[in-house]
Image (cartoon, grey):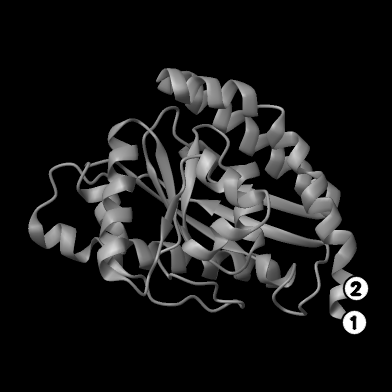
């Protein structure tokens, strides 16, 4: 029964591919010619349009605070909590000033049509059960960042599927600390209600808080060691504030 009730949402998700495909030719041309700035520009336009339109199509609305903290240029590493599949859709609509790909599980590459797009926007696929392949993927992500591409990381490693946030995996932060780019923490709340809570794609309201950037350039070993905990606390405090506002 849930499969049948999800068919309209799935149709909308695949219909939204047209907003990505509008930029495919320019994006692929820029990538093949090595024009990184043109490639980044088209990735941003594609993901921003796709996220905004898919939210509209599915009845997902959102409030955003901290927009003044969005970067004017990259590269940066966004660090966000991860409640549900809708996180990516909402964040593509909200984080709309610089291009970003994201770190994803390898099995997402097998999603029909979307799997190719995940790679096309310079995302990183990770096989978490294979430590050697994970290290290779992390190195690839660092190379992307060194070439000016931004990355979104969900350091919990999996969806929380609810309001409670899990621990952050420390290894993910190497993508920021090794190339010494700013980390921008993001708190997002409400996306689990769009699918994970009932297992049915539904409309919903999401709140997002964008925090001030945290510099990683010149960190001491001790500062680098405590960075994951520091960012975790920032994201958690943001979640607490978002929920407090909802209850008032």
Q: Residue at x 37, y 68 (%)?
A: 233
In this rendering, would 174 be left or right of 61?
Answer: left
> Does residue 136 lie above or below 145 as drawn?
below
Q: Could you tell whether 75 is left or right of 69 in the image?
A: left
Secondary structure of the residue carrying numbered label 1: loop
Q: From the image, tell me which residue sits under label 1.
A: 1
Is 89 left or right of 187, judged from the image as shown? right
Image vertical order of residue 187 relative to residue 99, above or below = below
Residue 150: quarter of image:
top left
Residue 161's x, y, as percent?
61, 77
Q: Is residue 190 visible?
A: no
Between the C-alphas of marks 2 and 1, the distance is 5 Å
Residue found 49% across the figure and 72% down from its top: 158
Q: Residue at x 32, y 38 (%)?
A: 145
| Residue at the disc numbered 2 | 4
Q: Residue at x 56, y 26 (%)?
A: 27
Q: Which quadrant holds the N terminus?
A: bottom right
Helix, strand or loop at label 2? It is helix
Q: Is residue 223 visible?
A: yes
Please provide percent x and percent y for residue 184: 40, 48
Whether pointer 2 and pointer 1 mark residues with C-beta atoms closer than 8 Å, the reply is yes
Q: Residues within 10 Å of mark 2 (few under 14, many from 20)?
A: few
Which one is in front, 127 or 75?
127
Q: Position of residue 81 (x, y in %)?
A: 49, 64
Q: Residue furthest left?
A: 221
Q: In which quarter of the view is residue 203 placed?
A: bottom right
* Marker count (numbered): 2
- Dividing the picture into quadrants, the one containing residue 50 is top right
On the rendered image, what quadrant is the C terminus found in? bottom right
């Amino acid at each position: 029964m849930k499969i049948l009730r999800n068919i309209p949402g799935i149709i909308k998700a695949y219909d939204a591919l047209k907003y990505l495909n509008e930029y495919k030719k320019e994006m692929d041309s820029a990538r093949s010619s090595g024009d990184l700035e043109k490639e980044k520009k088209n990735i941003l336009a594609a993901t921003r349009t796709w996220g905004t339109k898919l939210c509209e199509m599915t009845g997902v609305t959102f409030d955003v605070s901290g927009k003044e903290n969005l970067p004017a240029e990259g590269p940066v590493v966004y660090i966000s909590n991860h409640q549900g599949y809708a996180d990516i859709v909402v964040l593509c609509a909200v984080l709309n000033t610089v291009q970003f790909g994201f770190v994803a599980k390898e099995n997402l590459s097998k999603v029909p049509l979307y799997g190719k797009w995940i790679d096309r926007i310079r995302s990183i696929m990770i096989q978490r059960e294979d430590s050697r392949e994970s290290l290779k993927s992390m190195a690839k992500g660092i190379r992307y960042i060194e070439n000016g591409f931004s990355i979104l990381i969900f350091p919990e490693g999996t969806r929380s599927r609810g309001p409670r946030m899990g621990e952050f995996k420390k290894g993910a932060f190497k993508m920021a600390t090794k190339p010494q780019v700013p980390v921008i923490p993001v708190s997002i709340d409400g996306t689990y209600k769009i699918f994970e809570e009932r297992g049915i794609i539904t409309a919903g309201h999401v709140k997002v808080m964008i925090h001030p950037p945290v510099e990683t350039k010149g960190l001491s070993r001790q500062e680098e060691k405590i960075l994951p905990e520091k960012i975790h606390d920032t994201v958690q405090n943001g979640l607490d504030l978002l929920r407090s506002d909802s209850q008032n």
